[in-house]
Image (cartoon, rainbow, N blue to C red):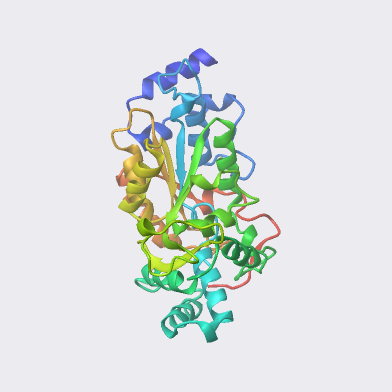
C-alpha cells in the first residue's frame, strides 16, 4: 500500500494545488481517515485534507514537510465559528456591552451599536468593519484585559441569536474544530489570524481551541498604563501600581494584506495551509500558496447552507468560482459538513 501511495503522489506532485487535491484517487482512502467524524461521507474537502496529511507526514513522500515547517493559519469568524446570524462575535459582544452601558457611551459609539442590531439578519452595512473597530476602541477605553475577558466570558454564555440549542460560545463549526485538532495531532503549529481584536479572540477560543495566546493574531487597539497620563510610552516607566488598559486608539484592521504583514512579522515563516471564508482572507491564502517551497493548500469555507445555517447558495457559488480560478480550494458547509453545530441545534428564523 505504501509503495502504491507513493507512486500516486509522485505522479501528481507537480499539479496545481486544487488539481492535485482533486486527483487524489480512491485507492488512497484505504488508510484510516483522520478527518471524518463531522464530515459527510464522500466529502471532497475531507478526502483532499486526508490525502494531504498522508502525503506531507510520510517521510518517503516527495511532499514530506518537516515538523518545524508545518504551519497552518485560520481566520476565525465564518471559518471556525458562526458569523452569519446576525454577525460575527465581535460585533455582537460590542453591541451588547455598549447598549447596556449606553448612558456612559459617546453618541457615535451608541449609534454604531444600534446600527449593528438594526441590521441583524440582513446584509452587513458597507464600511461596518472599520466603524465597529473604531467604536470598539473608544467603548473599551480604560478597560483592563481582565475586565475585557469577563465581558467576553459573560457574552459567551448568552443565547446564540437565530438558533435554538446553543450559546454564543458554543457556536463553533464542529467539522472545522475537528480539523484544527487533527492538524495539531499531526504536529502542526497553528495560528488564528483574524480581523477581530486579538484579546477578545484569546478569550473566545478558551475551552475550545488549545493554542497559546501568542498564537492569536488580530486587530490591535492601543494600550497605556493607568498612571501614564499624557506621557508617551517611550517617556514613561511602568510602575508596580500600574495596570495596562486600552487607551481608546485603533491601530487599523487586520484584514487583507495586513494579514500577510502580520504573518511575516509575528510568525516569520510561510504557512503551508490557510483557511478563510471571505475576501478579507484572500491575501493570506494567495500568500500561502504562492512560491511556497512545500506542498501548500488554501481553503475557503462557503456559507452555502440555507437549511441549517443562514447561507446564500447562489452567492457562495459565485465566490467559489472566483476562488478556484486563483487556485484556492473550497469547503461547502452544505455538502461537506455532516453537522454544523450539532444535531440538536436548529435555526430559529427562516430567511
Looking at the rendered image, the quarter that the N terminus falls into is: top right
Task: Give percent across and percent down for residue 310.
Answer: 52, 65
Would you place residue 324 above or below residue 121 in this image? above
Q: Is residue 86 visible?
A: no
Among the 4 quarters of the image, the one containing residue 298: top left
Query: In the image as oriented, which residue stretches furthest toward the top?
Result: 3
Would you place residue 302 above or below residue 21 in this image? below
**Is 199 situated left or right of 279 in this image?**
right
In front of the other: 125 or 34? 125
In front of the other: 333 or 215? 215
- Residue at the image position 56 percent from the left and 81 percent from the top: 101
Task: Give percent across and percent down for residue 30.
Answer: 58, 24
Would you place residue 124 above or below residue 224 in this image? below
- Residue at the image position 44 percent from the left and 54 percent from the top: 218
In front of the other: 100 or 66? 100
Task: Give percent across and percent down for residue 104.
Answer: 52, 83
Q: Is residue 255 visible?
A: yes
**Is 219 situated left or right of 240 in this image?**
left
In front of the other: 66 or 12? 66
Task: Give percent across and percent down for residue 183.
Answer: 54, 36
Amino acid at each position: 500500500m505504501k509503495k502504491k501511495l507513493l507512486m500516486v503522489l509522485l505522479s501528481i506532485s507537480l499539479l496545481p494545488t486544487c488539481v492535485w487535491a482533486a486527483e487524489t484517487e480512491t485507492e488512497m482512502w484505504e488508510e484510516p481517515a483522520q478527518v471524518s467524524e463531522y464530515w459527510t461521507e464522500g466529502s471532497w474537502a475531507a478526502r483532499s485534507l486526508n490525502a494531504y496529511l498522508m502525503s506531507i507526514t510520510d517521510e518517503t513522500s516527495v511532499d514530506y514537510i518537516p515538523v518545524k515547517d508545518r504551519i497552518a493559519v485560520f481566520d476565525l469568524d465564518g471559518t471556525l465559528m458562526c458569523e452569519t446570524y446576525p454577525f460575527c462575535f465581535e460585533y455582537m459582544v460590542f453591541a451588547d456591552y455598549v447598549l447596556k452601558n449606553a448612558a456612559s457611551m459617546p453618541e457615535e459609539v451608541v449609534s454604531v451599536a444600534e446600527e449593528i442590531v438594526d441590521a441583524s439578519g440582513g446584509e452587513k452595512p458597507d464600511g461596518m468593519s472599520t466603524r465597529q473597530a473604531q467604536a470598539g476602541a473608544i467603548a473599551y477605553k480604560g478597560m483592563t484585559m481582565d475586565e475585557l475577558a469577563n465581558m467576553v466570558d459573560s457574552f459567551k454564555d448568552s443565547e446564540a441569536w437565530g438558533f435554538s440549542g446553543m450559546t454564543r460560545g458554543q457556536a463553533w463549526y464542529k467539522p472545522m474544530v475537528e480539523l484544527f485538532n487533527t492538524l495539531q495531532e499531526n504536529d502542526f503549529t497553528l495560528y488564528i489570524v483574524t480581523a477581530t481584536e486579538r484579546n477578545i479572540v484569546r478569550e473566545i477560543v478558551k475551552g475550545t481551541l488549545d493554542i497559546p495566546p501568542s498564537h492569536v493574531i488580530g486587530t490591535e487597539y492601543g494600550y497605556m498604563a493607568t498612571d501614564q497620563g499624557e506621557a508617551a510610552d517611550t517617556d514613561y516607566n511602568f510602575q508596580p501600581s500600574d495596570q495596562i488598559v486600552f487607551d481608546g486608539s485603533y491601530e487599523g484592521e487586520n484584514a487583507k494584506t495586513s494579514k500577510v504583514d502580520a504573518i511575516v512579522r509575528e510568525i516569520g515563516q510561510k504557512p503551508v495551509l490557510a483557511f478563510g471564508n471571505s475576501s478579507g482572507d484572500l491575501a493570506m491564502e494567495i500568500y500561502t500558496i504562492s512560491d511556497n517551497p512545500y506542498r501548500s493548500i488554501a481553503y475557503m469555507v462557503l456559507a452555502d447552507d440555507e437549511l441549517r445555517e443562514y447561507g446564500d447558495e447562489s452567492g457562495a457559488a459565485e465566490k467559489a468560482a472566483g476562488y478556484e480560478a486563483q487556485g484556492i480550494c473550497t469547503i461547502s458547509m452544505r455538502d461537506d459538513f455532516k453537522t454544523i453545530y450539532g444535531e440538536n441545534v436548529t435555526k430559529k428564523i427562516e430567511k
